[in-house]
Image (tube, rainbow, N blue to C red):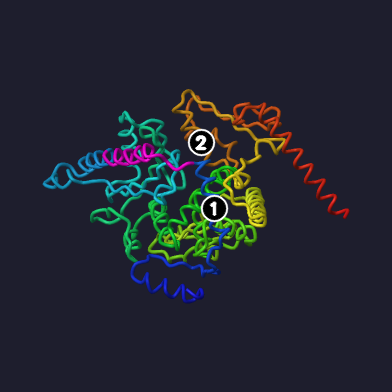
């Protein structure tokens, strides 16, 4: 590979007839990794593994057992549901072998899931199984399962979901309805055009739900090296979690947004090592001119009436107002960072700049030991740096109701709908929400991971460090 044009030509030739989407990014660098890049990659991965170890064999087994158990539960429920809808006919033998199509998405599809990561599963249901049947009948069925607990149905979410705990594993189960009469496909299509045929006639909500599995699959098609991508994504996910940025509901970025950003940088630097990619990640995003969108593939055109879900700032005034567009590949092209606001975008920019500064310093000093990277993953100072906080205190009659209530309240927080909670249909007897503006000294001890005493020390050190930075800046101005 001598230049970007020949690289893209070879890529298109090799992928002809196999890829559903093609990268839109033209690689900007093919420089082979140097000795420091290799050393620093070894160091940063050792640091990541020490802070957030990969799931153990037992934990992976628990996930696989949960998937198998969920498949059995869904198969039994689907057969009973089809019997009730169609009655007992000559097709009884066929229905007795009917199995539910479950598609894995999110971090576990990308193979970067941690022990505590939820399972994101899309239930791809036959045409006769409606959303109403799914969220009512299946809820009743799950409530009868001894291994299922903490069941919460979020029917009014942008992507409706059933959240529950299956044995020791958290599951987010989404619903997508196949709009055609023949059998539901058991796997995602892998040939160009086939996936569009599968979605023909599907409603907007089902298209969005199915995208959870499809986007993860497409990302793996679009990265030059899946192994390097996964390692880089593990680093970025850990950094985002430790810095308090891994939250779509709070106005930052969710897992799919971080995956797309890493995919984008991997496409730009296809031969870079993990440590070099992390450095480039911060460099690229520090200088990125938002709201210029991040695109990893050319957006596909819509089909039928499903085009209304497509991100289209030229014709949709709401899409035009997005501050940080990070767009999914394939159809529908959706902005995964729609919750980002001016305040959270400012924080993200600050954190990208902080990451770049640390990476620049490590490279300049030639540091690559695993301990050198600890500063990159230092926990956020959000609980010690601000003098005042907005506190939302929730109350419910029992633990199950509290889980349901907190799940609902968290969803519209970004829209400041807290004053409208009293009129919401999700609010039940005994559910209350109190919103207060509290000074730092009035925050409950429970919000500090290490306790209030440790937080007082952390806050004092933070204030002193900021005072030191101001003093250094003042001295430099005098000089």
Residue sticking out furthest to the right:
478
The x and y percentages for residue 18 are: 34, 67
Q: Quadrant of residue 449?
A: top right
The x and y percentages for residue 381 are: 66, 39
The residue located at (24%, 39%) in the rendering is 76
Residue 454 vertical placement versus 45 (above, below): above
Q: For mark 1, does the 10 Å Cα neighbourhood hold few (<14), some (14 to 19), or many (20 or more) residues?
A: many
The residue located at (20%, 41%) in the rendering is 83
Mark drawn on residue 424: 2
In terms of depth relative to the viewer, which is nearer, 191 or 336? 191
SS for callout 1: loop
Mark drawn on residue 337: 1
**Which image quarter holds the C terminus?**
bottom right
The residue located at (55%, 69%) in the rendering is 28
The residue located at (53%, 26%) in the rendering is 395
Of tags 2 and 1, which is closer to the observer? Answer: 1
Residue sticking out furthest to the front:
35
SS for callout 2: loop
């Amino acid at each position: 590979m001598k230049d970007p044009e020949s690289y893209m030509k070879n890529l298109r030739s090799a992928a002809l007839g196999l890829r559903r989407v093609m990268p839109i990014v033209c690689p900007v660098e093919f420089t082979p990794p140097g000795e420091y890049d290799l050393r620093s990659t070894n160091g940063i991965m050792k640091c990541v593994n020490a802070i957030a170890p990969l799931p153990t064999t037992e934990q992976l087994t628990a996930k696989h057992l949960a998937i198998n158990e969920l498949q059995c539960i869904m198969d039994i429920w689907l057969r009973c549901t089809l019997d009730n809808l169609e009655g007992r006919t000559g097709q009884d033998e066929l229905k007795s072998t009917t199995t539910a199509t479950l598609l894995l998405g999110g971090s576990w599809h990308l193979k970067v899931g941690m022990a505590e990561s939820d399972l994101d599963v899309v239930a791809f249901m036959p045409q006769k199984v409606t959303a109403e049947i799914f969220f009512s009948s299946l809820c009743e069925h799950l409530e009868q399962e001894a291994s299922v607990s903490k069941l919460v149905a979020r029917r009014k979410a942008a992507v409706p979901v059933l959240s529950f705990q299956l044995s020791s594993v958290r599951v987010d189960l989404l619903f997508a309805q196949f709009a055609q009469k023949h059998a539901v496909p058991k796997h995602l299509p892998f040939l160009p055009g086939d996936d569009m045929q599968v979605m023909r006639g599907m409603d907007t909500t089902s298209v969005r739900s199915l995208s959870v599995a499809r986007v993860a699959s497409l990302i793996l098609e679009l990265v030059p090296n899946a192994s390097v991508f996964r390692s880089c994504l593990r680093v970025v996910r850990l950094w985002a979690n430790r810095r308090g940025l891994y939250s779509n509901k709070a106005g930052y970025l969710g897992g799919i947004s971080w995956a797309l950003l890493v995919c984008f940088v991997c496409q730009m630097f296809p031969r870079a090592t993990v440590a070099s990619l992390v450095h480039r990640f911060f460099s690229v995003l520090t200088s990125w001119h938002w709201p210029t969108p991040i695109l990893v593939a050319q957006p596909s055109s819509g089909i039928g009436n499903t085009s209304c879900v497509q991100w289209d700032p030229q014709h949709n005034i709401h899409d035009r107002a997005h501050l940080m567009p990070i767009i999914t590949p394939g159809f529908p092209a959706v902005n995964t960072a729609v919750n980002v606001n001016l305040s959270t975008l400012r924080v993200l920019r600050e954190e990208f700049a902080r990451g770049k500064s640390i990476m620049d310093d490590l490279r300049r000093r030639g540091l690559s030991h695993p301990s050198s990277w600890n500063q990159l993953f230092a926990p956020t100072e959000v609980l010690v740096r601000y003098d005042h906080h907005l506190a939302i205190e929730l109350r419910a009659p029992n633990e199950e109701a509290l889980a349901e209530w907190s799940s609902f309240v968290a969803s519209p927080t970004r829209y400041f709908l807290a004053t409208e909670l009293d009129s919401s249909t999700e609010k039940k007897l005994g559910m209350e929400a109190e919103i207060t503006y509290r000074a730092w000294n009035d925050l409950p001890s429970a919000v500090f991971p290490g306790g209030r005493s440790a937080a007082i020390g952390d806050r004092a050190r933070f204030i002193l460090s900021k005072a030191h930075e101001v003093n250094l800046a003042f001295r430099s101005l005098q000089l």
